[in-house]
Amino acid sequence: MSQALYDPEIGYYAGPKNPVGEDGDFITSPRISEVFGFALAGLVSEFLARQGDAVCSIVDIGCGDGSLLRQLASSLSFREHRQAHFFGVDRNLGRIEGGEKPGEQIDFLTSVEVVPQQNPALVIANELFDALPFARLVQRQDGLHELWVREEDGRREWVELPAPHYFQTYFAEREIKLVAGQFADVALEWGELYESICRIADRAMIVTIDYGFPDRQLFDPRIRKFGTAAAFRHHAVHRDLLAEPGNQDLTAHINFSDLRRSGERSGFQTLLFSRQAEFLLRLGITEHPLFTPVQDLPFDNLLDASVELEKRQAARRLVLPDGIGQEMRVLVQSRNLPESEWSFQRKLF
């Protein structure tokens, strides 16, 4: 799976093609609507205001083409621009839209470890952890097995082998008991990567937005007996992970409990764990003009009206009960920051 996703020559995420967007294989919240960046820009401004005159790092890990980071940077006032330094981190910087621009206050880096650590930092990780390679496991009567891939005569097929002890330890430490025939998808790197993010700054806030659940829900055999592994190709989801290695996205829901515990071990406190829709509503996403009542807007022709309505429908996808806003979860943790209530903690009603 690591080869299929990240091999320098054949890996899905290693090529120049952007996998996100209408011409890609899947869509993310920043690409669905500009209102996602609008809401996060409000959090950036709030974070900067609480740091006094300190220069702050705004870090987007898994920044992709850099469009979200540039939207956040463009939203700041002149004073805020002097206070903020933006960093985009991604393994593949070849997809940065327009490349790195001279004079731009954004540094694009390939590793979390090289982000300067002297400044208070607001870190955003949007759909980062579900892009990590994961292991497919299955519980059998004789114990836990790991699924490997065998290739013979040009055909790929799954092969079950006894799982290494560290996977058994993973479930034992979390007091998770899989039932016979139950599949589970696990990346041990979830917690390891989060711990490395925790080292970015002594004063920091980490906002993680991703598909996933706490461990009790993620490994509940009544709901997810066959795991969560999926492949995406041309905006269609299917379960044949071996179909087109290197040409399709492979993903699984993450264990938010791993992230939460890793942060708390590093001295972070959990400020919020909720659905993305609630998080964005608390940040004031509906203050964006796209949420203005449509009857209050003048239109010169039907084409303009159609384009505007399409934008409004996309914006609402982020907060409606049946959209991506309900499927995604948000974890916010902080360390050594003011304890007064943040906007995302306020009550909606």
Image (tube, rainbow, N blue to C red):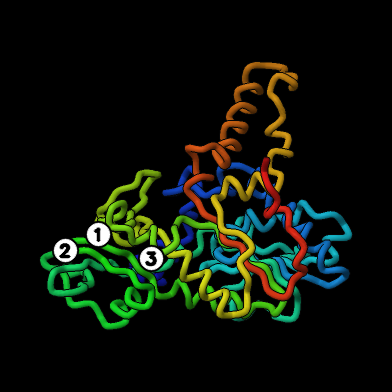
Residue 333 visible somewhere in the drawing? yes
Q: Which residue is mark 2?
A: 157
The answer to which of marks 1 and 3 sits earlier in the sequence is 3
Figure quadrant of residue 254: bottom left
The answer to which of marks 2 and 3 sits earlier in the sequence is 3
Q: Which of these two is toward me, 241 or 325?
A: 325
- Whether label 2 touches label 1, CB < 8 Å: yes
Taking 125 as reference, is 100 left or right? right
At x 61%, y 26%, the residue is 309
Above/below status of 79 relative to 258: above
Q: Which residue is mark 3?
A: 5
Marks 2 and 1 sit apart, C-alpha to C-alpha, by 8 Å
Q: Which of these two is toward me, 116 or 322?
A: 322
Q: Which of these two is toward me, 301 or 162?
A: 162
Where residue 177 appears, as percent x and y from the top left, is 28, 68
Could you tell me which secondary element the residue under label 2 belongs to? Answer: strand
Could you tell me which secondary element the residue under label 1 belongs to? Answer: loop
Q: Which of these two is toward me, 259 or 117?
A: 259
Q: Which residue is mark 1?
A: 242
Could you tell me which secondary element the residue under label 3 belongs to? Answer: helix
Where residue 11 appears, as percent x and y from the top left, is 38, 66
Amino acid carrying mark 2 in the image: Glu
Residue at the top extreme of this rendering: 301
At x 52%, y 49%, the residue is 28
Residue count near mark 2 (Cα–Cα under 10 Å), binned few <14, some 14–19, many ≥20: few
Above/below status of 71 relative to 115: above
At x 47%, y 67%, the residue is 257
Q: Quadrant of the C terminus?
A: top right
